Image: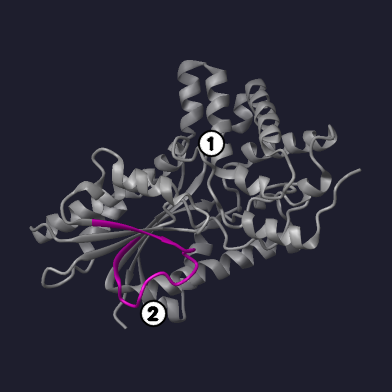
Amino acid sequence: MPRTMSSAKAKDSAERAAAGVMGSGYARHSGVQHSAESNGMPMLARALEAVALPADGAPFRAADLGAAAGTNSLDPMRAVVEGVRRRTGTETPVTVVHTDILDNDFNALLHNVLSTPGSYAQMPGVFAFAEARSFYERLFPAGELHLAWTAIAVHWLSRLPAQVPDHIFSTSATGDVREAFAQQAREDWSAFLTHRADELVPGGQLVVVGGAAADDGSSGAEGLMAAANAVLVELVDDGKLDKSEYAHMTIPTWNRTRAEFLAPLQDGQLAQAWRVEEHDLLALPDMLLEAYERTNDVDAFADQVTAFFAAAFEPSLWSALEDTRDVSALTSEFESRLKARIVADPRSVETHWHVVLLRFTRTTD
């Protein structure tokens, strides 16, 4: 007999899904995110040239928002330390606070930040910390920060506003469901900008490398999401996944268009608090597919795509499962079927993620 999910269970699963927790393999399988982030490094360099510096040898204070496992934080935070010290001509003390949600693996984060050979945190006069709280909340005292950086994180929503019927990804939503996602994204982005405006000093810089959408609302990953969704439907048809569980499997993300990112800065308090210095929208190459085209190793390609999907999105999907579920068995079955589907048609999952690049200056009140 199919199991039904209680309203309490559904609420709990929605809250856990909306957390955007990364899988245990995220540090090893986040090369796509690292590649996307690298496009923001020139903008970060310009931010470091423009940022207001502390006076009288006080520490420069930076925040790395949505740090996940920390592996993709090392290059930008080293750039922060080196950029500040290049301008001051001294070993200015630098504090960096890596933030993420409470359910993030902070052991992995701190291990990677503190123990990776050559990490910025091993430089003299650098102090690394972590904070377990969503960046849609207030994280720091007023005027605490000189610079805030976030990369491939703001597409995760603070909560799941609705379930997408017959799909796991919000770009497939229509009507009222689509509007519910768009509204949640508007509220979250406004909260993000409001809190950062409070936390940054006048002349402080905010750099955002954000998962985004083209003007038509597409993320560039529709093929991959369709493949994953089709596998889940197969599992339902084969009796390996309950319909009620599948119905609650929605990835809590919304990829905003550039217009959506810039809309709250057109007028009102946020427009007064921020000056938009730069903005750009990119469609990224599919680095995994390019590697496959060089090697013609379709099995390796399928393994890499599946591992990427598993690390980034499986925790959100599996949060819909009953607590008594054998998650390991379902995970193995899902990943095996997804790999087979990719091997059969590798170009069906060609992915060109859209990324927005933004740089803002905190204005003088």
The three-letter amino acid code for the residue at tag 2 is: Gln
Q: Residue at x 61, y 66 (%)?
A: 184
Give above or below for 239 relative to 151. Answer: above
The answer to whether residue 39 shows anywhere in this view is no
Q: Is residue 289 magenta?
A: no
| Left or right, 4 with reference to 325 | right
Residue farthest to the top? 296
Which mark is drawn over residue 308? 1
Which mark is drawn over residue 346? none
Q: Indicate the secondary structure of the residue bearing disc 1.
A: helix
Percent coordinates x, y for residue 70 in the rendering: 38, 47
Residue farthest to the right? 1
Percent coordinates x, y for residue 246 in the rendering: 77, 46
Q: Crowding at label 2, few (<14), some or many (≥20) Cα neighbours within 10 Å?
A: some
Task: Give the extent of the magenta segment.
Answer: 127-148
Q: Which residue is mark 2?
A: 272
The answer to the question of whether label 1 and label 2 lie on touching residues, with beta carbons closer than 8 A, is no
